[in-house]
């Protein structure tokens, strides 16, 4: 059966590394991005040059209409989805809660939580064996911040990832009998563009391994969760924290 995965936020960082690895493992890959079309097309072109299948799809995951349209484009181009990686996510400027505006907190939850739930909903509607699908897999990208709380930096972000953890546990139970597995990874300090300048260098002192992780190291865990090798694993979390 053709393996089709949609990876949100796949133009850069962890999503892009996951897209390259998924393509190498035989998935047709939907490369979602929000605004950096050139970056998304670079990943898509790389996959095609290596003989794989990929399409770049622009959609802001916090927009219900754009999410629906993204899934419809995938249906038309590749056929029914078998896997979703809810990876798109944002942080914010570092600050304590006392300095945060309501708009900032709302936007954080719109992208990180609402976006993941809308994409998962569209995926479940297509994958569920109860509605004629063949089952599937969802991997949510949470964060070590869900457990640390990220005090003085962005507890709104940490709380949004806490919501992702709870969402992962609940949805895993809700759809287990419909042939769908739902798991999450919790990366720690991973070397991508998401960090404010200098933050990663400061934070690696807290990591027992003494270094930041790479996006490719996170992608390996995601690909295991997507694969049949994890066929009895659902509602589970893989911490990728360098020993923290
Ligand atoms: P990144 O390098 O900043 O890349 C973010 C990706 O998300 C980009 O492809 C971006 O698209 C996309 N994106 C942002 N907002 C979006 C929206 N509203 N709709 C659709 N796509 C959107 O981030 P990253 O470090 O790879 O992080 C990926 C995930 O891992 C996030 O969920 C993050 O919270 C989580 N995480 C990262 C770390 C870390 O240390 N890096 C640690 C723990 C968890 P454009 O290119 O178009 O902007």
Image: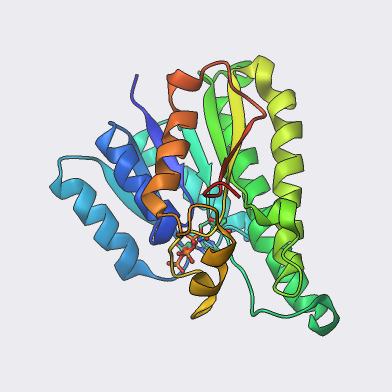
With respect to residue 223, does 103 lie above or below? Answer: below
Q: Position of residue 45 (x, y in %)?
A: 21, 55
Q: Position of residue 183 (x, y in %)?
A: 60, 33
Between residue 234 and residue 188, name the one nearer to us. Answer: 188
| Residue 42: quadrant of the picture | bottom left
Q: Is residue 127 left or right of residue 92?
A: left
Between residue 197 and residue 18, name the one nearer to us. Answer: 197
Q: Is residue 155 left or right of residue 48?
A: right
Q: How is the image coloured?
A: rainbow
Q: Is residue 103 left or right of residue 244?
A: right
| Residue 76: quadrant of the picture | top left
Between residue 195 and residue 34, name the one nearer to us. Answer: 195
Between residue 83 and residue 63, name the one nearer to us. Answer: 83
Q: Residue at x 46, y 60 (%)?
A: 212
Q: Position of residue 94 (x, y in %)?
A: 66, 79
Q: Residue at x 73, y 51 (%)?
A: 147
With respect to residue 26, does 69 lie above or below? Answer: below
Q: Residue at x 47, y 38 (%)?
A: 222
Return the residue found at the far right: 98
Q: Position of residue 216 (x, y in %)?
A: 36, 49
With respect to residue 115, does 130 lie above or below? Answer: above
Asked whether residue 90 appears in the rendered view, the answer is yes
| Residue 239: quadrant of the picture | top right
Quadrant where the N terminus is found in the figure: top left
Asked whether residue 82 appears in the rendered view, the answer is no
Q: Residue at x 29, y 39 (%)?
A: 23
Number of residue marks = 0
């Amino acid at each position: 059966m053709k393996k089709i995965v949609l990876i949100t936020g796949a133009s850069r960082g962890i999503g892009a590394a996951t897209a390259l690895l998924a393509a190498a493992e035989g998935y047709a890959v939907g490369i979602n991005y929000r605004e950096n079309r050139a970056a998304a097309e670079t990943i898509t072109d790389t996959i095609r040059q290596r003989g794989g299948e990929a399409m770049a799809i622009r959609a802001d995951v916090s927009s219900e209409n754009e999410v629906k349209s993204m899934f419809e484009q995938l249906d038309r181009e590749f056929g029914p989805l078998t896997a979703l990686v809810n990876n798109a996510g944002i942080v914010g400027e570092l600050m304590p809660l006392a300095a945060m505006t309501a708009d900032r907190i709302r936007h954080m939850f719109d992208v990180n939580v609402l976006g993941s739930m809308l994409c998962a909903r569209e995926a479940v509607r297509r994958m569920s064996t109860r509605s004629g699908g063949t089952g599937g897999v969802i991997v949510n990208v949470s964060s070590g911040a869900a457990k640390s709380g990220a005090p003085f930096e962005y507890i709104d972000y940490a709380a949004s990832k806490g919501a992702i953890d709870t969402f992962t546990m609940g949805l895993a139970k809700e759809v287990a009998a419909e042939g769908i597995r739902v798991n999450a990874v919790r990366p720690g300090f991973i070397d991508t563009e998401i960090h404010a300048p200098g933050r990663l260098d400061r934070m690696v002192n807290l990591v027992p391994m003494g270094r930041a992780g790479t996006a490719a190291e996170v992608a390996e865990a995601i690909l295991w969760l997507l694969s049949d090798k994890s066929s009895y694993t659902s509602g589970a979390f893989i911490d990728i924290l360098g020993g923290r």
